[in-house]
Image: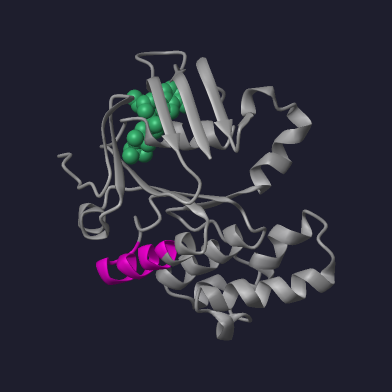
Amino acid sequence: MIDLENVSKSYSKGQPAVKHVNLHIGRGEFVFVVGNSGSGKSTLIKLLLKELDPTEGIIRINGKDIGTLKHRQIPKYRRELGVVFQDFRLLKDRSVYENVAFAQRVTEVPNRIIKERVPEVLSMVGLAEKYKAYPHELSGGEQQRVAIARALVNRPALLLADEPTGNLDPKTSFEIIGLLDKINTYGTTVLVVTHNKDIVNAMKKRVIAIRQGIIVSDMQEGEYLYED
Ligand SMILES: Nc1ncnc2c1ncn2[C@@H]1O[C@H](COP(=O)(O)OP(=O)(O)OP(=O)(O)O)[C@@H](O)[C@H]1O
Protein backbone atom coordinates (compact mmCIF):
# COMPACT_ATOMS: atom_id res chain seq x y z
CA MET A 1 0.00 0.00 0.00
CA ILE A 2 2.73 2.48 1.07
CA ASP A 3 6.37 1.92 0.17
CA LEU A 4 9.12 4.40 0.85
CA GLU A 5 12.53 3.62 -0.51
CA ASN A 6 15.38 5.69 0.86
CA VAL A 7 13.21 8.82 1.02
CA SER A 8 14.71 12.12 2.14
CA LYS A 9 13.24 15.61 2.10
CA SER A 10 15.27 18.75 2.68
CA TYR A 11 13.82 22.22 2.85
CA SER A 12 16.04 25.01 1.62
CA LYS A 13 17.49 25.71 5.06
CA GLY A 14 18.74 23.42 7.79
CA GLN A 15 18.80 19.69 8.30
CA PRO A 16 16.67 17.35 6.15
CA ALA A 17 13.17 16.99 7.67
CA VAL A 18 13.01 13.33 6.56
CA LYS A 19 16.18 11.29 6.22
CA HIS A 20 16.69 8.04 4.31
CA VAL A 21 13.37 6.58 5.32
CA ASN A 22 12.55 3.02 4.27
CA LEU A 23 9.06 1.93 5.16
CA HIS A 24 6.49 -0.60 4.08
CA ILE A 25 2.87 -0.42 5.17
CA GLY A 26 0.71 -3.23 3.86
CA ARG A 27 -2.88 -3.12 2.70
CA GLY A 28 -5.29 -3.23 5.61
CA GLU A 29 -2.81 -2.17 8.30
CA PHE A 30 -3.53 0.36 11.05
CA VAL A 31 -0.40 2.34 11.89
CA PHE A 32 0.41 5.15 14.31
CA VAL A 33 3.25 7.52 13.50
CA VAL A 34 4.55 9.27 16.60
CA GLY A 35 7.30 11.75 17.32
CA ASN A 36 7.69 15.15 18.89
CA SER A 37 7.19 18.51 17.29
CA GLY A 38 9.50 19.05 14.34
CA SER A 39 10.36 15.36 13.96
CA GLY A 40 9.06 15.25 10.38
CA LYS A 41 5.56 13.77 10.72
CA SER A 42 3.77 16.48 8.75
CA THR A 43 6.46 16.39 6.10
CA LEU A 44 5.83 12.66 5.75
CA ILE A 45 2.08 13.22 5.30
CA LYS A 46 2.76 15.96 2.73
CA LEU A 47 5.06 13.62 0.82
CA LEU A 48 2.34 10.96 0.73
CA LEU A 49 -0.21 13.51 -0.49
CA LYS A 50 2.32 14.73 -3.06
CA GLU A 51 2.08 18.23 -1.67
CA LEU A 52 5.85 17.93 -1.50
CA ASP A 53 8.26 15.90 -3.59
CA PRO A 54 11.14 14.05 -1.96
CA THR A 55 14.65 15.37 -2.52
CA GLU A 56 15.73 11.76 -2.83
CA GLY A 57 14.13 8.32 -3.00
CA ILE A 58 10.93 6.74 -4.29
CA ILE A 59 7.41 6.70 -2.86
CA ARG A 60 5.05 4.03 -4.13
CA ILE A 61 1.37 4.04 -3.27
CA ASN A 62 -0.53 0.99 -4.41
CA GLY A 63 2.55 -0.03 -6.37
CA LYS A 64 2.62 3.24 -8.32
CA ASP A 65 5.67 5.50 -8.14
CA ILE A 66 3.99 8.83 -7.36
CA GLY A 67 7.08 10.67 -8.58
CA THR A 68 6.01 9.81 -12.11
CA LEU A 69 2.57 11.44 -11.80
CA LYS A 70 2.03 14.34 -14.17
CA HIS A 71 0.87 17.63 -12.74
CA ARG A 72 -2.64 17.17 -14.12
CA GLN A 73 -2.90 13.67 -12.57
CA ILE A 74 -2.28 14.91 -9.02
CA PRO A 75 -5.83 16.03 -8.12
CA LYS A 76 -7.15 12.62 -9.12
CA TYR A 77 -4.40 10.90 -7.15
CA ARG A 78 -5.31 12.93 -4.01
CA ARG A 79 -8.98 12.11 -4.34
CA GLU A 80 -8.09 8.45 -4.10
CA LEU A 81 -6.76 9.07 -0.59
CA GLY A 82 -8.89 10.01 2.39
CA VAL A 83 -7.41 12.72 4.58
CA VAL A 84 -8.42 13.99 8.01
CA PHE A 85 -6.80 16.91 9.83
CA GLN A 86 -6.66 18.19 13.40
CA ASP A 87 -8.74 21.26 12.55
CA PHE A 88 -11.49 19.39 10.62
CA ARG A 89 -11.41 21.80 7.63
CA LEU A 90 -15.14 21.75 6.99
CA LEU A 91 -16.90 24.30 4.80
CA LYS A 92 -18.59 26.53 7.39
CA ASP A 93 -21.41 27.72 5.15
CA ARG A 94 -22.47 24.22 4.07
CA SER A 95 -24.52 21.63 5.87
CA VAL A 96 -23.15 18.29 7.01
CA TYR A 97 -24.72 16.67 3.96
CA GLU A 98 -23.19 19.20 1.58
CA ASN A 99 -19.77 18.97 3.19
CA VAL A 100 -19.71 15.26 2.43
CA ALA A 101 -21.45 15.54 -0.95
CA PHE A 102 -19.02 18.25 -2.06
CA ALA A 103 -16.15 15.75 -2.18
CA GLN A 104 -18.20 13.82 -4.72
CA ARG A 105 -19.55 16.76 -6.70
CA VAL A 106 -16.02 17.86 -7.60
CA THR A 107 -15.39 14.41 -9.05
CA GLU A 108 -18.60 14.63 -11.05
CA VAL A 109 -20.15 11.62 -9.42
CA PRO A 110 -23.78 11.35 -10.61
CA ASN A 111 -26.36 12.77 -8.22
CA ARG A 112 -28.06 9.41 -7.91
CA ILE A 113 -24.87 7.89 -6.45
CA ILE A 114 -24.29 10.89 -4.18
CA LYS A 115 -27.79 10.51 -2.72
CA GLU A 116 -27.01 6.91 -1.95
CA ARG A 117 -23.49 7.25 -0.57
CA VAL A 118 -23.74 10.36 1.58
CA PRO A 119 -26.38 8.93 3.96
CA GLU A 120 -24.46 5.65 3.95
CA VAL A 121 -21.18 7.23 5.18
CA LEU A 122 -23.01 9.55 7.57
CA SER A 123 -24.63 6.59 9.26
CA MET A 124 -21.30 4.79 9.35
CA VAL A 125 -19.87 7.70 11.41
CA GLY A 126 -23.03 7.90 13.52
CA LEU A 127 -24.33 11.21 12.18
CA ALA A 128 -27.22 10.20 9.95
CA GLU A 129 -29.63 12.37 11.91
CA LYS A 130 -27.54 15.53 11.75
CA TYR A 131 -27.31 15.80 8.00
CA LYS A 132 -28.98 19.24 7.94
CA ALA A 133 -26.81 20.75 10.68
CA TYR A 134 -24.07 23.29 10.03
CA PRO A 135 -20.55 22.83 11.42
CA HIS A 136 -20.98 25.50 14.14
CA GLU A 137 -23.95 23.54 15.50
CA LEU A 138 -21.80 20.47 16.09
CA SER A 139 -19.34 19.46 18.80
CA GLY A 140 -15.68 19.00 17.91
CA GLY A 141 -16.10 15.24 17.86
CA GLU A 142 -19.10 15.51 15.55
CA GLN A 143 -17.20 17.84 13.23
CA GLN A 144 -14.38 15.33 13.06
CA ARG A 145 -16.92 12.61 12.22
CA VAL A 146 -18.14 14.73 9.31
CA ALA A 147 -14.54 15.14 8.16
CA ILE A 148 -14.10 11.37 8.37
CA ALA A 149 -17.31 10.80 6.39
CA ARG A 150 -16.05 13.22 3.75
CA ALA A 151 -12.72 11.39 3.62
CA LEU A 152 -14.50 8.05 3.15
CA VAL A 153 -17.15 8.96 0.62
CA ASN A 154 -14.90 8.29 -2.36
CA ARG A 155 -14.07 4.89 -0.86
CA PRO A 156 -10.30 5.36 -0.53
CA ALA A 157 -8.06 2.38 0.06
CA LEU A 158 -5.90 4.57 2.32
CA LEU A 159 -6.95 7.02 5.04
CA LEU A 160 -4.35 9.48 6.38
CA ALA A 161 -5.14 11.27 9.63
CA ASP A 162 -2.87 14.10 10.84
CA GLU A 163 -3.43 14.61 14.60
CA PRO A 164 -7.14 13.77 14.28
CA THR A 165 -7.70 14.06 18.03
CA GLY A 166 -5.55 17.14 18.60
CA ASN A 167 -8.56 19.41 19.27
CA LEU A 168 -10.68 16.89 21.17
CA ASP A 169 -11.13 15.94 24.81
CA PRO A 170 -9.93 12.48 25.94
CA LYS A 171 -13.32 10.73 25.76
CA THR A 172 -14.11 12.10 22.30
CA SER A 173 -10.57 11.29 21.17
CA PHE A 174 -11.12 7.63 22.05
CA GLU A 175 -14.42 7.63 20.18
CA ILE A 176 -12.79 9.05 17.07
CA ILE A 177 -9.95 6.53 17.18
CA GLY A 178 -12.53 3.79 17.71
CA LEU A 179 -14.25 4.95 14.56
CA LEU A 180 -10.98 4.90 12.60
CA ASP A 181 -10.39 1.40 13.94
CA LYS A 182 -13.84 0.31 12.77
CA ILE A 183 -13.15 1.77 9.33
CA ASN A 184 -9.90 -0.20 9.30
CA THR A 185 -11.72 -3.45 10.04
CA TYR A 186 -13.76 -2.86 6.87
CA GLY A 187 -10.49 -2.99 4.92
CA THR A 188 -9.22 0.60 4.64
CA THR A 189 -5.54 1.06 5.45
CA VAL A 190 -5.26 3.73 8.16
CA LEU A 191 -2.24 5.86 9.07
CA VAL A 192 -2.62 8.14 12.08
CA VAL A 193 -0.05 10.75 13.07
CA THR A 194 -0.50 11.54 16.74
CA HIS A 195 0.95 12.87 19.99
CA ASN A 196 -1.71 11.12 22.02
CA LYS A 197 0.16 8.72 24.24
CA ASP A 198 -2.93 7.30 26.00
CA ILE A 199 -4.55 6.37 22.73
CA VAL A 200 -1.42 4.81 21.26
CA ASN A 201 -0.86 2.75 24.41
CA ALA A 202 -4.48 1.61 24.57
CA MET A 203 -4.83 0.56 20.95
CA LYS A 204 -1.93 -1.92 20.66
CA LYS A 205 -1.29 -1.18 17.00
CA ARG A 206 1.86 -0.88 14.96
CA VAL A 207 3.74 2.22 16.15
CA ILE A 208 6.40 3.94 14.07
CA ALA A 209 8.43 6.53 15.96
CA ILE A 210 10.29 9.30 14.16
CA ARG A 211 13.00 11.46 15.62
CA GLN A 212 14.69 14.18 13.60
CA GLY A 213 13.46 12.69 10.36
CA ILE A 214 14.67 9.16 11.08
CA ILE A 215 12.57 6.12 11.99
CA VAL A 216 13.92 5.17 15.40
CA SER A 217 11.51 2.35 16.14
CA ASP A 218 8.80 0.38 14.41
CA MET A 219 6.90 -2.09 16.56
CA GLN A 220 3.82 -4.25 16.17
CA GLU A 221 1.50 -3.78 19.14
CA GLY A 222 3.78 -0.94 20.08
CA GLU A 223 3.67 1.70 22.73
CA TYR A 224 4.36 5.39 22.87
CA LEU A 225 7.86 5.11 24.31
CA TYR A 226 8.84 8.44 23.05
CA GLU A 227 9.14 11.36 25.49
CA ASP A 228 8.32 14.85 24.24
N1 LIG B 1 8.12 24.78 4.72
C1 LIG B 1 9.20 24.57 5.45
N2 LIG B 1 10.36 25.24 5.22
C2 LIG B 1 11.46 24.98 5.95
N3 LIG B 1 11.52 24.09 6.96
C3 LIG B 1 10.41 23.40 7.24
C4 LIG B 1 9.19 23.59 6.51
N4 LIG B 1 8.25 22.75 7.02
C5 LIG B 1 8.84 22.06 8.02
N5 LIG B 1 10.14 22.44 8.14
C6 LIG B 1 11.12 21.89 9.10
O1 LIG B 1 11.18 20.48 8.92
C7 LIG B 1 11.27 19.80 10.16
C8 LIG B 1 10.10 18.79 10.29
O2 LIG B 1 8.87 19.52 10.36
P1 LIG B 1 7.43 18.82 10.35
O3 LIG B 1 6.43 19.91 10.22
O4 LIG B 1 7.42 17.74 9.36
O5 LIG B 1 7.40 18.20 11.82
P2 LIG B 1 6.20 17.56 12.65
O6 LIG B 1 6.76 16.32 13.25
O7 LIG B 1 5.01 17.42 11.81
O8 LIG B 1 5.93 18.64 13.78
P3 LIG B 1 4.53 19.04 14.50
O9 LIG B 1 4.19 17.91 15.40
O10 LIG B 1 4.92 20.30 15.26
O11 LIG B 1 3.53 19.29 13.43
C9 LIG B 1 11.29 20.88 11.23
O12 LIG B 1 12.63 21.12 11.58
C10 LIG B 1 10.68 22.08 10.54
O13 LIG B 1 11.19 23.29 11.08
Q: What stretch of residues is rendered in magenta?
A: 168-181
Instruction: Say above or below: 89 vs 78.
Output: below
Q: Residue 192, how many percent across, how many down?
A: 40, 49
Residue 51 visible in image: no
| Along the viewing direction, whichever of 53 and 61 lies nearer the viewer | 61
Along the line of sight, which residue is nearer the eye, 32 or 149? Answer: 32
Give x and y (percent) for residue 6. Answer: 44, 18
Q: Which quadrant does ligand 1 occupy?
A: top left
Q: Magenta region's main secondary structure?
A: helix
Where residue 51 appears, as percent x and y from the top left, is 58, 32
Q: Is residue 175 magenta?
A: yes
Residue at the image position 26 percent from the left and 58 percent from the top: 199
Q: Which residue appears farthest toward the bottom when viewing the image?
A: 129
Residue under the image location 53 percent in, 40 percent down: 1
Asked if the stretch drawn in magenta spans residue 159, the answer is no
Give the quarter of the image for residue 43.
Answer: top left
The residue closer to the viewer here, 26 or 197, is: 26
Q: Is residue 94 above or below residue 51?
A: below
Kindly indicate the quadrant of the structure image that contains residue 175: bottom left
Q: Quadrant of residue 128?
A: bottom right
Residue 172 located left or right of residue 117: left
The vertical placement of 114 against 77, above or below, is below
The residue located at (15%, 39%) in the rendering is 227
Q: Which one is in front, 22 or 99?
A: 22
Could you tell me residue 152's position as x and y percent? 59, 61
- Number of numbered markers: 0
